[in-house]
Amino acid sequence: MDVTTAKRLEHIRGILDPGKVDGPPKLLLFSRSGFTPELRGLAQGRDDVELIGLERLYVGS
């Protein structure tokens, strides 16, 4: 999974009606094959993006 997916989800989040959501939704990205280094860099230090791979899904954070 790469940055393109995160950017697409950010765009979708941006067009949500603010009156129908309680604060900005987090972006949860699930992948069984991993994440590109660029996506990991984008997610690092951001509270609104979480990368969930198989290890985290089955073992925990």
Image: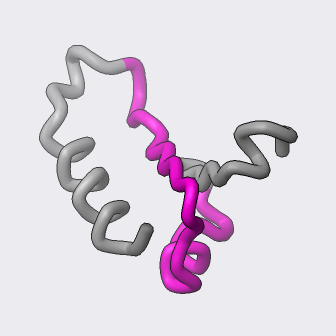
Residue sticking out furthest to the front:
33
Q: Residue at x 40, y 19 (%)?
A: 22
Quarter of the view holding residue 37: bottom right
Q: Could you tell whether 6 is left or right of 26 in the image?
A: left
**Residue 16 placement (x, y as % from top left):** 18, 32
In the displayed structure image, the side of residue 32 where residue 59 appears, left or right: right
In the displayed structure, would residue 22 be above or below residue 1?
above
Residue at (50%, 74%) from the top-left corner? 39
Residue 44 location, x and y as percent?
65, 70
Report the residue at 21% width, 17% height from top. 19
- Judge whether 56 appears above or below 8 on screen: above
Look at the image and give the residue range highlighted in magenta. Answer: 22-46
Residue lying farthest to the top in this orientation: 20
Q: Hey, which quadrant is residue 7 in on the image? A: bottom left
Q: Quick check: 34 left or right of 1? A: right
Residue furthest out toward the bottom = 37
- Indicate whether 33 appears above or below 56: below
Residue pictured at 13% horizontal, 41% vertical: 15
Quarter occupied by the C terminus: top right
- All told, the count of numbered labels is 0
Instruction: Indicate the position of residue 34 as horizontal and vertical percent values.
Output: 58, 67
> In the image, is residue 54 above or below residue 60?
below
Residue 47 position in % (x across, y down): 61, 51
Colour scheme of the picture: one colour
Q: Nearer the viewer, residue 38 or 31?
A: 31
- In the image, 23 versus 53, the foreground residue is 53
Image quadrant where one finds the N terminus: bottom left
Quadrant of the rendered structure where residue 33 is? bottom right
